[in-house]
Image: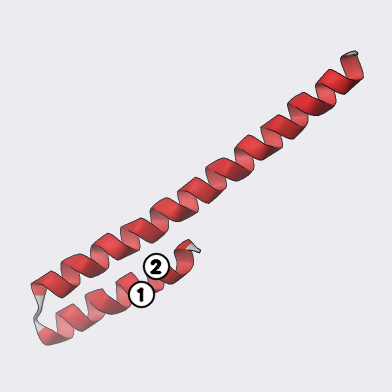
Amino acid sequence: MGILDKITGRAKQAAGDVAGDGSLKREGRKEERKGEAKEELGNAQDKADAKADEVSNLERKTN
């Protein structure tokens, strides 16, 4: 999910460098950051799911 945004962002940054277009370069940086944020969200969701499974298993064992 986030990897595509990161790749697109880097491509836009490179195109902005080549063309001398600062706005395209900034847009690329924002898009790359969006991809990083999506990856962070996915990692956090995975950790939350793992913790929920752990709690569920502990509850079954103690009841």
What residue type is disc 1 on?
Thr
* Quadrant hosting residue 28: bottom left
Name the spot of residue 4 as percent of width and height, x first. Answer: 44, 71
Q: CA distance from mark 1 to mark 2?
A: 5 Å
Q: Which residue is mark 1?
A: 8
Q: Quadrant of residue 20?
A: bottom left
Where is mark 2, residue-wise?
5
Q: Please tell me which residue is depicted at 21% across the width and 67% down the height of the picture.
A: 27
User: Number of callouts in the render?
Assistant: 2
60 with respect to 43 (left or right):
right
The local secondary structure at tag 2 comes to helix
In the image, residue 47 lies at what x, y percent?
62, 39
Say how the picture is coloured. secondary structure
Out of 56 and 20, give the one closest to the viewer. Answer: 56
Q: Position of residue 59 (x, y in %)?
A: 82, 19
Q: Are marks 1 and 2 in contact (CB under 8 Å)?
A: yes
Quadrant in which the C terminus is drawn: top right
